[in-house]
Amino acid sequence: MSQIFQYKDYREFLRSYVSHRKQENPDWTIAGWARELGLLATTSMTKILNGQREPGEKICQKLTEYFRFNSEETKYFDYLVHLNKCTDSAMREMFTEKLLRLTPAMGKLSIDEARLQIVSEWIHMAIRQMAQVQPLPNHPDWIASQLIFESSTEQVRQAIDNLLQLGLLNLQDGKLHKSESWLTTTEDIPSKALRSHHSQMIENAKQAIEKVPVLEREIRGMTMAVPQGKMEIAKNMIRQFTEDMAKLMNENSTDQVYQLNVQFFPLTKFEKKSETHQEIQ
């Protein structure tokens, strides 16, 4: 039986369980399972499995107790249920982010170094987000004309092909649509593709100083002395800020695509002090 973290739809998880039980015991029934769960109506689980109703809080609790989920698995299952109920795109994105944070590395969409080439060129993510603002005509020359930073028609065409191949864009009725597939990358692990992506975005930020009116951008910098022992706390704060920013800006009425860069890096290479080192007075 597969683990809950391998599922992106709670109904698929429940259906998989039903199939598993029936293979083990042909006499096993969904109605009997409902009685085992302590549900008043034996048809409740059938309706849930068929998509005729959603499980309420009490049924969710009975299911998570039945499967003996730990706290993380319980949260994951509950978030899957909430995600399925949501119609608001901002709320769906919020629950998607929560699911991503809970998903173990092996359960996430794995992207090896070859597939990471899609992020090595900045236009991939830009085009994907453009398709969230509005369905895009599948015309690379038109899409290239909508980008502030210069990109050739051939670069755009290749980026679209890559995004379609990985299921990050869908083509429907001649229009490109952003899919709900999840894209995750490793954190704190060196990657040539990721380094290329960040370098290009930093270069775009430099050009934005000249190309973009000041009222349409915000570029700040601060030079500070820091304690190295607080680096992990600082990095977690930056990661949380970027997640909060994404939630704030993710609405149905988006009308532009922006890039958020937060740069925090050393300017010096002092040798670290040993515990016995005494400062010169």
Image (cartoon, rainbow, N blue to C red):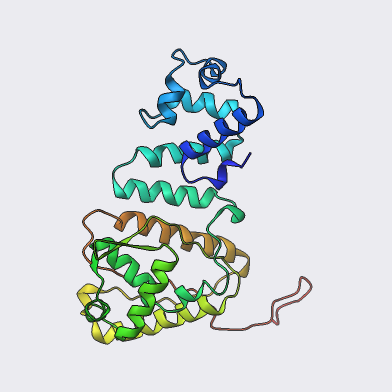
Q: Say which of 222 and 210 sits in front.
A: 210
> In this rendering, does residue 273 appear at all?
yes
Q: Residue at x 58, y 63 (%)?
A: 232
Q: Residue furthest front?
A: 26
x, y (%) of residue 256?
Answer: 24, 67
x, y (%) of residue 137?
Answer: 22, 69
Q: Say which of 225 and 51 sits in front.
A: 51
- Residue 157 location, quadrant: bottom left
x, y (%) of residue 72?
Answer: 57, 41
Question: On screen, 77 above or below 42?
Answer: below
Q: Residue at x 45, y 82 (%)?
A: 199
Image quarter (top left, top right, bottom left or bottom right) of the N terminus: top right
x, y (%) of residue 131?
Answer: 28, 64
Q: Residue furthest top?
A: 40
In this figure, what is the number of numbered marks? 0
Question: On screen, 61 above or below 179?
Answer: above
